[in-house]
Image (tube, grey):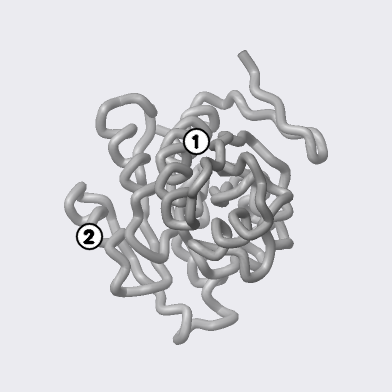
Amino acid sequence: MFKIAVLASGGGTNLQAIIDAVNNKEINAEISYIITDNEKAYALERGRLNNIPVMSFDRKQYKEGLSDKILEVLKGKADIIVLAGYLSILQGDIIKEFKNRIINIHPSLIPSFCGMGAYGIKVHEMAIEYGVKVSGCTVHFVDEGTDTGAIILQKVVEVMEGDDAKKLQERILVKEHEAIVEAVKLFSEERVQIDGRKVSIKG
């Protein structure tokens, strides 16, 4: 069966969307591991409530060795790694070992409002400050850069008159849940093809 590993740092609502999709058979797969870089992340509790193996490796303790520790756990035990609100930067051999098999969801329409320092509410503050008329979310491959991997899919959200960062974040989060489930389902069905920076969907 197709095996999913999810990395998270916080509450794990995107993780929950994946759990729900697996539980209701929308995705024919199993979540093999949930790993956090924060032992207080509620994502761990979501895993325990669904009998999914959970692990936590504190980023302050492991520092530069964090990615290698995760690779040690996941090598040969996951078909895809999903970053769902994961704040540490993956680096080193895990990127090579899981080439084109690590995906991330970012709360903007990449290449806007992304890269180092663009995470969480900050992304939406940047969008509001810039005055964009639409924003949204992007599921993309993870490579050696930060938010630089090829784009798999995007969902668009209109920026409404009177929006602040919090309101925009809430509406985009709904689309994030849809996008991450859609992307994982496509991978589980082997429908994702990548050619350089261009990603196409079979069928």
- Counting from the top left corner in percent of width and height, residue 26 is at 35, 25
Instruction: Find residue 76 and report its horizontal and vertical position in percent.
Output: 50, 51
Number of dots carrying numbers? 2
Q: From the viewer's perspective, is residue 155 above or below residue 141? A: above
User: To which residue does mark 1 refer?
Assistant: 179
Q: Is residue 50 left or right of residue 89?
A: left
Q: Is residue 27 visible to us here? A: yes
Quadrant in the picture for the C terminus: top right
Quadrant of the frame with the N terminus = top left
> Do the residues bearing badges 1 and 2 touch, measured as CB atoms within 8 Å?
no
State the image coordinates of residue 4 (x, y, percent, origin top left).
43, 44
Q: CA distance from mark 1 to mark 2?
A: 23 Å
Density class for disc 2 (Cα within 10 Å; few <14, some 14-19, many ≥20) is some
Q: Position of residue 22 (x, y in %)?
A: 32, 34
Residue lying at 50% horizontally and 71% vertically, measured from the top left: 69
Under tag 1, what secondary structure?
Answer: helix
The part of the image, by quadrant, that contains residue 44 is bottom left
The residue most toward the top is: 203
The residue under label 2 is 45
Is tag 1's residue or tag 2's residue first in the polypeptide sequence?
2
Between 53 and 141, which is closer to the camera in this rendering?
A: 141
* Image position of 126 (left or right of 78): right
Q: Secondary structure at mark 2?
A: helix
Residue lying furthest bottom: 61
Amino acid, disc 2: Glu
Residue under the point 56% across and 79% down: 65
Give me the residue at 28% from left, 56% from top.
Answer: 53
Q: Tag 1: residue type?
A: Ala
